């Protein structure tokens, strides 16, 4: 194969819910950027992106029930995600950094270019 040849590969994955779409998106971001996010971290990021924030007790309780986890676990994850810039505090609310939030109610097409240095 010639060194400047570009290979295009198209992949398609169907999901049932907005949250599943968000989880796929954040899993891909984690993999491409070597973030090494855990499944639970990706679940929390996705849930927060859909809900808008993870500040209020009722939203945290909903996440805990949905994923069978605890408040202290969520607090630890939030702390880690704030340190790496995935979560931010804006107007007193803990949110996903707007740079990586999209409308998960719509279909999503990603263009990923992997290049040699």
Image (cartoon, grey):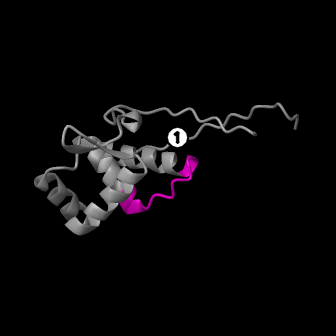
- Disc 1 secondary structure class: loop
Location of residue 78 (image quadrant): bottom left
Asked if one can make out residue 107 in the rendered structure from this viewpoint, the answer is: yes
Residue with the mark numbered 1? 12
At 51% from the left edge and 58% from the top edge, which residue is drawn?
Answer: 36
Asked if one can make out residue 69 in the rendered structure from this viewpoint, the answer is: no
At 41% from the left edge and 61% from the top edge, which residue is drawn?
Answer: 39
Near-viewer residue (110 or 72) = 72
Near-viewer residue (61 or 55) = 55
**35 part of magenta stretch:** yes
**1 part of magenta stretch:** no
In the displayed orientation, state which residue is furthest to the left.
58
Q: Which residues are magenta?
A: 31-42
Lateral position of residue 72 relative to residue 106, left or right: left
Residue 90's spot in the image, x, y percent?
25, 38
At 31% from the left edge and 54% from the top edge, which residue is drawn?
Answer: 44
Location of residue 78 with respect to 93 vertically, above or below:
below
Lateral position of residue 41 relative to residue 1, left or right: left
At 36% from the left edge and 36% from the top edge, which residue is drawn?
Answer: 101
Quadrant of the drawing holding the N terminus: top right
Location of residue 69 (image quadrant): bottom left
Quadrant of the drawing holding the C terminus: top right
Lateral position of residue 102 relative to residue 90, left or right: right
Residue 67's spot in the image, x, y percent?
26, 63
* Marker count (numbered): 1
Location of residue 103 with respect to 44 vertically, above or below:
above
């Amino acid at each position: 194969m010639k060194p400047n040849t570009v290979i295009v590969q198209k992949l398609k994955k169907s999901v049932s819910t907005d949250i599943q779409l968000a989880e796929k998106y954040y899993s891909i971001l984690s993999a491409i950027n070597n973030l090494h996010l855990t499944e639970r971290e990706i679940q929390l990021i996705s849930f927060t992106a859909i809900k808008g924030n993870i500040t209020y007790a009722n939203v945290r309780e909903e996440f805990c029930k949905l994923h069978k986890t605890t408040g202290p676990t969520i607090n630890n994850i939030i702390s880690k995600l704030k340190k790496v810039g995935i979560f931010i505090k804006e107007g007193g609310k803990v949110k996903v950094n707007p740079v990586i939030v999209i409308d998960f109610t719509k279909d999503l097409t990603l263009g990923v270019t992997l290049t040699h240095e």
